[in-house]
Amino acid sequence: MEGPDRSRSAGAPPAAPPAGPGPSGPAAPDPGPGGTAPVRPFQLRDVKLGNGLLQEKRDRTKNYLRQYDERRFLVLFNNQAGRPNPAGVSVPGGWEDGGLLSGHWAGHFMTGLAQAYADQGESIFKTKLDWMVDEIAACQDAITARMGAGGGPGGGDPEEPQIGRAPGRFDSGLRLNGPSAAQHVTLPQEAISQLTDFTIATWVNLASAQSWSRVFDFGQNATVNMFLTARAGVTGNVPRFAITTGGSGAEQQINGDAALPTNEWVHLAVTLTQNTGTLYVNGRVAGTNSNMTLNPTHLGNPGNRWIGRSQYGDPFLDATIDEFHIFDRALSQQEVQSLLDSAAGTTGGGTIAWYRFDEEGGSTLKDSSPNGRDAGVVANQAETELWVPTHPGYVGAIPEDAVLRLGPPRWAVYGGNKDTNTWAPWYTQHKIMRGLLDAYYHTDNQKALDVVVKMADWAHLALTVGDKNHPDYTGPITRDNLNYMWDLYIAGEFGGANEVFPEVYALTGDAKHLETAKCFDNRESLFDACVQNRDILVVTPENRPGRRRPDRLHANTHVPQFIGYMRVYEHTGDREYFQAAKNFYGMVVPHRTFAHGGTGGNYPGSNNNTEMFQNRDNIANAMAQGGAETCTTYNVLKLARNLFLHEHDAAYMDYYERGLLNMITGSRADSTSVSNPQVTYFQPLTPGTNRSYGNTGTCCGGTGLENHTKYQETIYFKSADGGTLWVNLYAASTLTWAEKGFTVVQETNYPREDHTRLTVNGSGRLDIKLRVPGWVRKGFFVSINGKAQKVDAKAGRYLTLSRTWSRGDTIDIRMPFSIRIERALDRPDTQSIFWGPVLLQILGNPGNGAYRELTLYSRLKRDGDYARSAITHASTTAAGDPLFTTHDLTLRPYYISDTQPASSYFRRVEPTIVFGSIDTGVANRKRNDGLPNYDVPVSGITSPGDDGPTFLDLVWDQAPFGNHGQFVSAVTRTAESFRRAGVFTAVESARVVSGAARANRDLEP
Ligand SMILES: [Zn+2]
């Protein structure tokens, strides 16, 4: 098959979108979110974005999609299908690299192209997408054509290469590139992706003096990596550790001082703490570098995590290795030396991973740390013969077997061994199916629908009949089997696969697809609890439900399950699915939501995995290190939007706006680079941290392609009966509501400015519902055709304009922004600052993870308006972004996306009760609200504790005050309640009230 004309995607993008109509033909039926709900979305193609923040982020992403060579995605599919590949086309990399998650990015890329096309109808996106769909269809046909009658023997285990063990330093070790087939080792991705300080220590016994071979090499490619070579091919052939994000010329190195011997055991260790890196040889300091600014988090989420293999294609390591430890801290020299005496020395073994190579043999390397991060040996062997599928219709970039082995009889677990482990195989199937459905919905590609229906047929067999050709097969997959599959950490992650099958049902009428969707019910350990609204997202070990559920659930595994349940509900009417989704959402928002809309985090002393849910109402405590995964917010937004279509509660849209205008817009770098998607993975929340961008081939890179090409999807909704238009978001845009004969043009520079004009072109009755954001404090004003309207505008509700409209009617909306402080649920002194819908970050790095400390109450006037004198507007950038200042610090909107360090939270320090310049001398004590109540051990915190808001918090929460008398009354009431509770003495209470009474002049606005 011909590829697309390559000249299209090379060089400069096309000058302008075609001026003619957008995508041609009737809109494809879309049984996606809300397809059967009382309120429904518009098709993506019905809404065009105007100029503004969202369009800027979108255009950068569209430029990437336009320029990226889509042929790179097909290489891995062709390899599985036995089809040839064009010369010189390389795989995308990251996790789209031939490893066990391969194929997921092809799906995201198709969705990205489909959405980019729906947006302005530029033909290049459809040309690329059509080509991908044709090729994937051809792969699907080629794989199915390999089946004989009944398929198989594909279900059998892939033949495992013979990999023995060799004598090690302690017990056995692993000989690489010696007599056995072992060539190099791959580690699972979590082994290094979230490390800052670290130690990597191992024994190595070199069989030859070979330059540049790697003891280890973790990274993305020859530009972004960190490695240890036993023998750098430069003068002296000393060992070298290096880390770089800019290729070999930008390496930060630690060089040893002498060449290592061959044919004897040598202990090597690299430690990094803050800016100091140390290389130890046999426990002796062989080199240091005290100017290190890079650490493993700067590598992003590296697709290549190798022992014995180089990113540069240097010779594989010719050596035996033993006792490979990874720690999340720098060991002391004494501790390093202790590793010379025994396998774990005094350390207890690697805290992140520890490979001992003491297995009997085989290609799995057990992780002896408590984390279960098994690694795999990659064998040196010729390409195996093409596999034969078990069921017809499969297509993917990994063998069918890598999906089937998750279930019985093998129950494969997550790990680095391509032949026996698995990595979220249904997640990948979902991304491919989603991409194909989006190609159908947004670009009318019929073939995409054909392919996805065959994939759904295959999925039905895979999840009901199962791995039938495996020699140990015992019969069809049971409900119990499915429960066991989905509870498995990471391997059981299915990415919301259950959302696509009800859509396939709606498109085909074949009810078996509803049955497939229900196969994904996570029944054993979560579903019923959510139906009953029991929050068990985090449990203690003794209360852990299910046979293999972790105590703490992985956020992005679980949020999409509930998106799928919504689709099951929409196409079956089965209410418990809705109830489960609604209740689950309520456990995440607000109880586990950070100011920017993200969830996840890390409690002090935890296992360094910020992808997990934290304890209910733990916000400040969950920011110990790192932040929130961007993907998860992508999914929580999807869930909020879908719930809104059924319940129309404006709180869902308040959350949606928070996540969209902060974390999602903030995830796309404001740069024009197209070498990668330039999106975030984690968005850190610890003070003074910076975002980093990139993410080719990762989950967040994939959802990143989607986030920025669908900004128009939630701006407007319509009622199923066509009588109501919902305006949910304020964003420059044009809605074409063809069946109603209305267009609505929204002119605004929101969220850079706080006013909006809607021009309604159409005639007849229509209710227009306007969202009054929950953050509104200074009113919400509406004029129609220039005439002010009396409206019932309540923050956090919708108001309705019922009217017979005429062509050209205008609605002007003003919702003055204000500075607003939000307090963390668990620590009221840990606060964030908002300007209208926008989180403001304080620029700079206070250092050592310390919070900025701000004192603000003495600057407030009676109106309680922070923007007047406490946190004030300083200037406006060329792009129109407002900058603020307080305490000589600069604050700016979170959505500005560069790499400057900044803080999303600060500590409020208000030691005494002060009204303007009047200091009462009374300590600003806290009300005892029993906060916090952490049920994981956090040192120095009693549980339950006695934290709560301060006296001044409670007084100023009642602002604005119409006159001084009202202010004094509020102070008197609050002081009296503190006195009654024994927090103030009678004398203190009187002193506070008298101070307030004297503050008339000070507080005059
Ligand atoms: Zn992600």
Image (cartoon, rainbow, N blue to C red):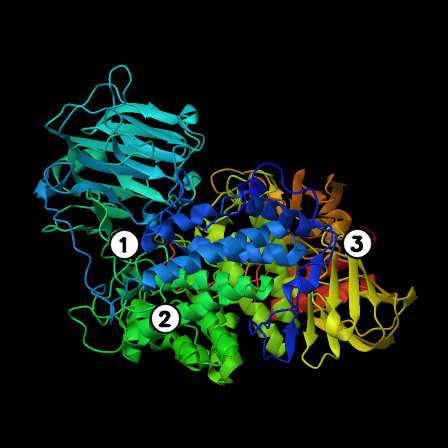
Asked whether the viewer can see residue 489, the reply is no
Secondary structure beneath label 2: helix
- Sequence-wise, which precedes: disc 2 or disc 3? 2
Q: Position of residue 1 (x, y in %)?
A: 45, 51
Name the residue located 28 percent from the left edge and 62 percent from the top edge.
146
Q: Classify residue 148 as left or right of residue 296.
A: left
Q: Is residue 558 above or below residue 180?
A: below
Residue nearer the viewer, 963 or 746:
746
Q: CA distance from mark 3 to mark 1?
A: 63 Å
Q: Residue at x 82, y 56 (%)?
A: 1000
Q: What is the residue that sits farthest to the front in this orientation?
A: 1
How crowded is the residue under tag 2: few (<14 C-alpha within 10 Å), some, or many (20+)? many
Q: Is the Cβ of the residue at disc 3 closer than 8 Å to that at disc 1?
A: no
Q: Earlier in the sequence, mark 3 or mark 1?
A: 1
C-alpha separation, residue under disc 2 versus residue under disc 3: 68 Å
Instruction: Tell me what residue is drawn at x 78 percent, y 50 percent.
Output: 868
Mark 3 Cα-neighbour bin, 10 Å: few <14, some 14–19, many ≥20:
many
Q: In this orientation, which residue lies closer to the viewer: 288 or 378? A: 378
Q: Position of residue 13 (x, y in %)?
A: 63, 41
**Looking at the image, residue 220 lies above or below residue 235:** below
Image marks 1 and 2: residues in contact by CB distance under 8 Å: no
Work out whether mark 1 precedes mark 2 in sequence or the reverse, and give the earlier one: 1
Report the residue at 56% width, 54% height from top.
113
Q: Is residue 321 visible?
A: yes
Residue that mark 2 sits on: 459
Provide the residue designation for mark 3.
1003
Tag 3: residue type? Answer: Leu
Q: Position of residue 304 (x, y in %)?
A: 34, 42
- Asked if residue 811 lies left or right of residue 141, the reply is right
Respond yes or no on whether mark 2 lies under 8 Å from ligand 1.
Answer: no
Task: Determine which of the numbered discs, if any, sits on residue 415 in the image.
Answer: 1
Q: Amino acid at mark 2?
A: Ala
